[in-house]
Image (cartoon, rainbow, N blue to C red):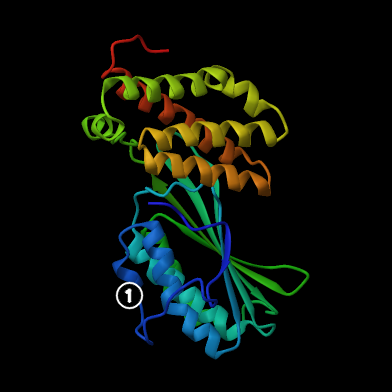
Amino acid sequence: MSLPPRLYAFHSTCMRIHGERRARVHRASSLPDLLRRIGRRFSPQARRMDTVLTLDVDPALAADLRGPFGPLGIVLARILDLALHRASEKKISMHVDVVGDDTSSQLVHFTVTVFGDDGPSSDAAMLADAAPLLHALGGTLHDETDERRRRHLIVELEFSLPPRSIDIDVAALRKTLGGDEPLQHVVDALEGALKRDIHSLDALLAESGVAELQAWLHRVSGVLGMAEATELARTGLTLEHGLAHGRSEWLDNAVRRFGHDAGRVLDVLRAHVDTHRI
């Protein structure tokens, strides 16, 4: 399941609101599901209060993270409730950023920024039960205010990364393509795309630019789409678009994982054709 684009407005027509029914954030089954539920729940309230509510998602964030999404939704809902009543400039943003990752987990910050807030005061009680709940999940809550009267309520929580499954229906792909020969062509195309860059990916990531890295992601994603590895191809395109906002250590790590997973797709396909692997 893909994450949303890096920036969009919760209160705009990007989200379809079904009446005034409150989305149950405690029933969220995944991170993308939680973000959608938050949008459905808080979009109408923000509109009624004439407040702009936006979401910014780090493209390095994995869509298949495992974690306590329901309880996290309760914490974020309480913070957003507070933010809507504190934003004197009628603007709130939530940034979801990867601040640490390895092969098995990602450390994520959910930062709710309130524009026009002088900081903690009588609202301490509203957050009093959110912090212990978050602590019970293994997370922490930070409450900061900068010189521009922007208050940042930061939820920090670590999520586990499951091993990515490579799900390709080779028999269906062979049938769609019309036999073994077209399948061989797809495998050859994927092999060619990977051979151009996969063995020098670390060197490519060591460079400071983004253009060549974006071209690599676009090329490999296109061939993955040909192989009907749809979700992985979509991940590559998300990373390509994310690079337009600049490089980061976490985004580079996500590109490395994508390259590794693309190689695994090739292995699956190579097992079904009469030729050697790269």
Q: Which residue of the protein is positioned furthest toward the left in this rendering?
A: 171
Q: How many marks?
A: 1
Residue at 57% in and 57% down: 6
Q: Is residue 272 left or right of residue 38?
A: left
Amino acid carrying mark 1 in the image: Arg
Work out whether 256 lies above or below 136.
above
Question: In x, y percent, where is residue 228?
Answer: 35, 37
Question: In x, y percent, where is residue 124?
Answer: 53, 79
Q: Quadrant of residue 129?
A: bottom left
Q: Which residue of the protein is positioned furthest toward the front in this rendering?
A: 178
Q: Quadrant of the C terminus?
A: top left
Residue at 28% in and 16% down: 273
Q: Which residue is mark 1?
A: 24
Q: In front: 234, or 85? A: 234
Q: Is residue 19 left or right of residue 151?
A: left
Decide if residue 179 is in sight here: yes
Q: Which residue of the protein is positioned furthest toward the top in this rendering?
A: 276
Residue at 58% in and 42% down: 240
Question: In x, y percent, where is residue 64?
Answer: 37, 48
Q: Quadrant of residue 20?
A: bottom left
* Mark 1 element type: loop
Q: Is residue 204 left or right of residue 32?
A: right
Residue at 58% in and 23% down: 201
